[in-house]
Amino acid sequence: MVYRVGCYIALPGINPSKLADDGGPGGILGILNMFAGGAFSRASIFALGVMPYISASIFMQLAGIVIPQVAKMQKEDSGRRKINSYTRYLTVIVTAFQASAYVAYLRSPQYASSLAPEFSVFMFWLSTVVVLTAGTLFVMWMGEKITDRGIGNGTSLIIMVGILARFPHSIVQELSFKNEGGGGGLLIFLIEIAIFIAVIIGLILLTQGVRKIPLNYARRIIGSTNAAKEVSGSRDFIPLKVNSAGVMPIIFAQAMMFIPTIFTGFTTNESASGFLKAMSDNTTLLYNLIYAVMVIAFTYFYTALIFNPTEMADNLKRNNSFIPGVKPGEDTANYIATIMDRITLPGAVFLAIAGILPGLASLMGVTSGFASFFGGTSMLIGVGVILDTLQQVESYLLMNHYDGLMKTGRITGRTVSGTTGGTTPSRSVSA
């Protein structure tokens, strides 16, 4: 609630009554506005949201892959605390740079009439940078407090709240549009809702889909020399996610697709201008084709960055576990890498389809606000965060000896016993 209230508090020097309510900017700025819950287009104190913190976290994560010293720090408690401190300092630097760029954006003709003439250029820049930096750090602090004292990942919940805040208005706007002359009426709207529910089901399958690799534990001797007994090895599995890259490939692809639009006003060549315009329209065939290819490429790239089969094989060897029929060590690493490469392809293809669905929905006559929820970044983040939060609620209930969140159905992490009717958490080895 505090975050949503802050999204409507305008920056000093901005007259909120003169801001144009045009749905916000497009391109990469539209993505930022979506993550900020519309605060970007409202010139709010939370205009940058939590995105600078996300950018700093991604940078530190990539640094852990490239720099051995950072990777070593990530494995120790004291090192992780230092990395968290470095991430916060880096967030301040990133926010200051983005806030300076936001000042230049606010001084564009779109916002010129809403700027207070009493503010000098320097005072407006200084106050905006300070307020936006403080706002981002406050949102980051709220996310960390939710993570520590609440349920779910606080930063992800804040992003999801910002995205879903636009959903009721989009539904009402779509219904009003369909009831207008030639819009198709209530029947077409109900068909769109049915398709929308089917898209959500498909995204849940994409998010939850795993390939289970069987795993055996070696026999162990438990007890003293005189009373030792041999315990047979147990069977578990390694769950490899079909879409381990999450929503990052779509974000990277959208950022790359925005680059050609920067050069739209710098050329007079008709063919080049036509190409650049096609690259800025998500309903064209060229845009969707290039966008889908980039999503698939970034899925493989990001999966290769975050997934380390050699480290996984070493962990299995240290835990006296092995994959049946595969030698420990290098053969296990190659086996896991081969399976990961095979399941990444269908995951990348389905992720690309989810990415181009909003453009296809717009092409079929759905309003742009409601079309953005037909897959894409919005619903992938929403579905992922909601499922993760449900799993945490389920885990808390099971640890306190409750049956779980639902008596019917099944959430990943819960299996139903056929003998007693109770529930026990399933065992798996984290990747």
Image: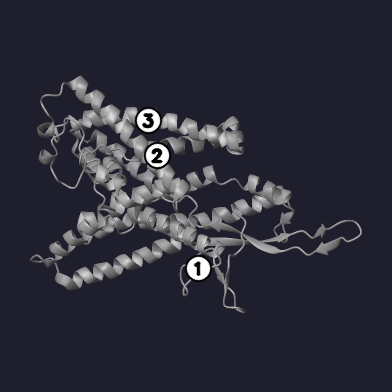
- For label 1, the crowd category at 10 Å Cα-Cα, with few meaning under 14, some 14 to 19 and many 20 or more, is many
Mark 3 vs mark 2: give the one in front.
2
Vertical comparison of 332 with 267: above or below: below
Check disc 3 and give the amino acid type.
Answer: Val
Q: Position of residue 77 (x, y in %)?
A: 59, 38
Check disc 1 and give the amino acid type.
Answer: Gly
Q: Is residue 38 visible?
A: no
Badge 2 marks a residue whose secondary structure is helix
Q: Which mark is residue 404?
A: 1
Check disc 2 and give the amino acid type.
Answer: Trp
- For label 3, the crowd category at 10 Å Cα-Cα, with few meaning under 14, some 14 to 19 and many 20 or more, is some
Could you give the CA–CA distance between mark 3 and mark 2, rounded to whole angstroms? 16 Å
Which residue matches tag 3? 94
- Left or right? Give the position of 325 relative to 252: right
Could you give the CA–CA distance between mark 1 and mark 2, rounded to whole angstroms? 31 Å
Badge 3 marks a residue whose secondary structure is helix
Residue nearer the viewer, 310 or 227: 227
Work out whether mark 3 precedes mark 2 in sequence or the reverse, and give the earlier one: 3
> Which residue is painted at 32% across and 52% down in the image?
161
> Which residue is painted at 72% across and 51% down in the image?
319
Vertical comparison of 417 with 339: above or below: below
Q: Quadrant of residue 67?
A: top right
Residue nearer the viewer, 189 or 146: 146
Vertical comparison of 95 with 123: above or below: below
Which residue matches tag 2? 141
> Which residue is painted at 20% across and 41% down in the image?
42
Vertical comparison of 428 with 318: above or below: below
